[in-house]
Each structure stands twice: as structure tokens, then as C-alpha cells.
Amino acid sequence: MKASPLRGRVKAYRLGHVAEALAAVALMAKGYRIEARRYRTKLGEIDLIARRGDLVLIVEVKARPSLAEAMDAIGRSSERRIASAADLWLIRQRDYARLSLRFDLVAVLPWRWPVHVENIFADSD
């Protein structure tokens, strides 16, 4: 019997939620406070927004078999979408003028603690 496409989407959706929860725990263990999960705007969605002091992390969470696959899963269009959504979040913050933004990746790999990759968009130009 063939699995339905809906079943596959539900499984991916659940995996995404579990991966985001694991990523949030890993960031909290590093001293970050989670400001938002699955922050939606008309321009796109941010998986996690974390903060420590004036540093705000815009975090893309990827559950993949390897770190390389997780890093490859973020393309130029994803980068633009995430950056645009981050701008919308940032302008809504009272203290936006003193905040520093950084775009990070948390890769959730099988049977490993989540891997936090800082400044994922730095080398994209």
C-alpha cells in the first residue's frame, strides 16, 4: 500500500516542530531567550528568534542527515525571505536602534545535539 502525500506532509510538519523545539533548548542552554517561534509575516516565516542582551538571532532550523545537507538547504531565495521577515520583526521592537541582528542556522542531526552555525549568510556575497 502506498503512503498518501498528506501523510508525508504531516510527518514533515511534526519533524519540523520537534526540530525547532530541540533547537530552542540548545539555544537556551547557551543563554539565549526565545523571543518567537514560527514568526509569520506576509514576506515569510522565521523559525526561531532568540535574544541575549542586544544580540538578536534570526534562526533557520533544518533537520537533515548531515550538517552539509542542512547548510545546502538554505538558498538565496530563503536568505532574502528570512531577511525581509527579520526586518519586519525588527521595526516592531521598541529598542530596535540598539539591537544587533545575526542570521544563524541550527542543524538538527540524527542522534546528535543540535549544531549551531553562526552567521550563516556572511559568506553569501
Image: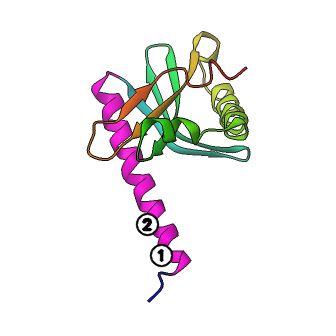
- Identified at 43% across, 47% down, the residue is 63
Q: Going by the image, does 115 lie left or right of 91?
A: left
Label 2: how many Cα within 10 Å (few below 14, some 14–19, many 20+): few
In the picture, the quarter occupied by the N terminus is bottom left
Q: Is residue 121 magenta?
A: no
The percent coordinates of residue 79 (x first, y second) are: 67, 34
Rendered image quadrant of residue 113? top left
Q: Is mark 1 on a helix, strand or loop?
A: helix
The furthest residue to the top: 98
Of the residues shown, which amino acid type is indicated by label 2?
Answer: Lys
As drawn, the label of residue 112 is none
- Identified at 71% across, 35% down, the residue is 76
**Gap in angstroms between the C-alphas marked 2 and 1:** 6 Å
* SS majority, magenta: helix
**Residue closest to the eye, 35 or 111:** 111
Q: Is mark 2 on a helix, strand or loop?
A: helix
In the picture, the quarter occupied by the C terminus is top right
Q: How is the image coloured?
A: rainbow
The percent coordinates of residue 62 (x first, y second) are: 48, 43
Query: What segment carries the magenta color?
Result: 4-31
Q: Do the residues labelled 2 and 1 touch (CB within 8 Å)?
A: yes
Q: Is residue 121 above or below residue 82?
A: above
Mark 2 sits on what residue? 11
Q: Going by the image, does 30 lie left or right of 88?
A: left
- Identified at 48% across, 21% down, the residue is 118
Q: In this view, does 13 lie above or below 73?
A: below
The percent coordinates of residue 96 (x first, y second) are: 62, 18
Q: Going by the image, does 71 lie left or right of 24?
A: right
Of the residues shown, which amino acid type is indicated by label 1?
Answer: Arg
Mark 1 sits on what residue? 7
Label 1: how many Cα within 10 Å (few below 14, some 14–19, many 20+): few
